[in-house]
Image (cartoon, rainbow, N blue to C red):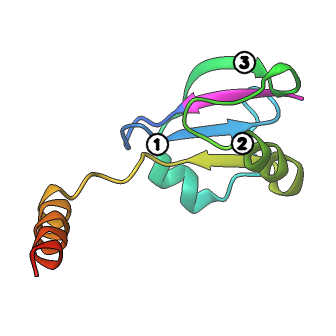
């Protein structure tokens, strides 16, 4: 399964996978407005891949089959304060 991968001009670490190079006809207009002008990153054959760096390969393939595109969003930002509080709570519980 060949696909083209584009990066967003407006949103960092946001990528759009489509089945056919430069064919965004299946992508909702609202998404394209938010995404901005797509910049081609690469063409790839998903059939030869065992995994992708930041996306679930099976989800990408299923999304391409079902809706004709896949949107990869950036990973959530780390909430260091939340992690610190959770660690402090854990230490308190262990000390009791």
The magenta stretch spans residue 74: no
Disc 1 secondary structure class? loop
Which residue, given by chain and number where applicable, does mark 3 sit on? 43
Identify which residue, 75 or 37, lies in the foreground: 75
Query: Residue 92, relative to residue 19: is it above or below?
Result: below
User: Where is the C terminus found, in terms of image quarters?
Assistant: bottom left
Give the Cα distance between marks 3 and 1. Answer: 19 Å
Q: Going 76% across and 36% down the picture, which residue do you hit?
A: 23
Query: Residue 19, relative to residue 45: is it above or below?
Result: below
Which residue, given by chain and number where applicable, does mark 2 sit on? 24
Structural crowding at the residue carrying mark 3, measured as other residues with C-alpha within 10 Å and reported as few (<14), some (14–19) or many (≥20): some
- 2 or 3: tag closer to the N-terminus: 2
Residue furthest front as drawn: 96
- 1 or 2: tag closer to the N-terminus: 2
**Image spot of residue 54 (x, y percent):** 55, 37
Task: Determine which quarter of the picture holds residue 47.
Answer: top right
Give the Cα distance between marks 1 and 2. Answer: 12 Å
Which residue, given by chain and number where applicable, does mark 1 sit on? 36
Question: For the magenta stretch, what is the residue range?
Answer: 1-6
Disc 2 secondary structure class? loop
């Amino acid at each position: 399964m060949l696909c083209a991968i584009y990066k967003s001009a407006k949103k960092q670490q946001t990528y759009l996978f489509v089945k056919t190079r430069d064919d965004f006809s299946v992508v909702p207009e609202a998404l394209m407005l938010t995404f901005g002008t797509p910049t081609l990153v690469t063409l790839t054959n998903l059939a030869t891949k065992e995994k992708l760096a930041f996306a679930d390969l099976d989800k990408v393939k299923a999304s391409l089959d079902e809706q004709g595109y896949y949107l990869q969003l950036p990973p959530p930002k780390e909430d260091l304060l939340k992690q610190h509080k959770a660690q402090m709570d854990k230490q308190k519980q262990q000390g009791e």
